[in-house]
Image: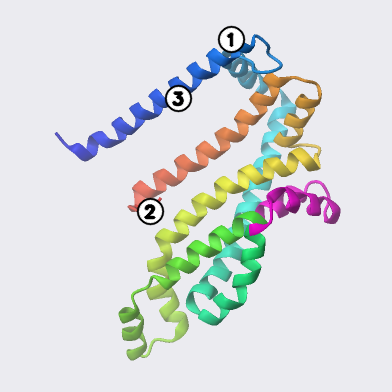
Amino acid sequence: MDVHANRPIARSGYAILSAAVLFAVWKLFSVATASDIILPPPEKVARVFFGLFAESRFLTALGATCVRGLWAFGLSMLIGGITGFASGASRRINALLGPALLVIRATPVLAIILLALIWFPSGTVPVFSAVIMAFPVVMADVAQGIGSADPKLVQMARLFGMNQTSIAMRVRLPSALPHIVAAAKSALGLSWKVVIAGEVLSQPQYALGTGMQSARVMLETTEVFAWAAAGIVLCALSDAAFALLARRFSWTTV
């Protein structure tokens, strides 16, 4: 029997068991509280969640949040990739960017969102906030990957007369590829979370965060859970997509 072939089955079994335990605990607490406003039961949340797909406002909000999340992810990968590549290839650039990166990482996400509310329109706030929080993650992983290139290979490439661009593309980039994929996975998951958090505060016309906030104001806790579940599904789908890429290209770091 192939042990490796059974690993995905075992992981799926553990995941199902974990989910079952989570929902059982949730159900017990909802029964104990006996109040849908405090903690609605999971079956009621599931019913409301699937019911939302029949509403145009939900589908429009879901699409708008997806667009914002993908914009934030793309900009984070672009900015983080460029700065990370430069930082990994040059100690001087790494030292130059280090203090700014430290400040960004130490700044609470709520502070970033509040400042963005002053500077930008409501639809831009979630994207800006997500980029500020996600690109340092990408930068750090890419810089680590670029710096992990075998020095002997780099030296050999120089001896053969390869210029810096060729060395970067043929030696450094392949060694950094698993780190870039891991950075992309982390950045996309973080982008969904920060974008939705930014939407809750900035209240764009169409957004999952806006739906959550509106439901909260009306004390519709079940609907808050349902809107939040949509964000969880986005994160889960992105994780699944990167897992498929990892198996397809044998990127074991993901």
Magenta region: which residues?
Answer: 106-131
Residue type marked 2: Thr
CA neighbours of label 2 inside 10 A, class few (<14), some (14 to 19), many (20+): few
- State the SS at label 2: loop
- Of pointers 3 and 1, the one earlier in the residue sequence: 3
Q: Is residue 123 magenta?
A: yes
Q: Which mark is residue 19?
A: 3
Prevalent SS, magenta region: helix
Q: Which residue is mark 1?
A: 31
For image coordinates 60% across by 53% down, the residue present is 73
Give the image location of residue 9, x and y in percent: 30, 31
- Of pointers 2 and 1, the one earlier in the residue sequence: 1
Q: Which residue is mark 2?
A: 253
Residue type marked 1: Val
Give the image location of residue 236, x and y in percent: 51, 37
Q: To which quarter of the image does residue 99 belong?
A: bottom right
CA neighbours of label 3 inside 10 A, class few (<14), some (14 to 19), many (20+): few
Q: Is residue 228 magenta?
A: no
- State the SS at label 1: helix
Q: To which quarter of the image does residue 96 belong?
A: bottom right
Q: Nearer the viewer, residue 58 or 138?
A: 138
39 lies above or below 189: above
143 lies above or below 249: below
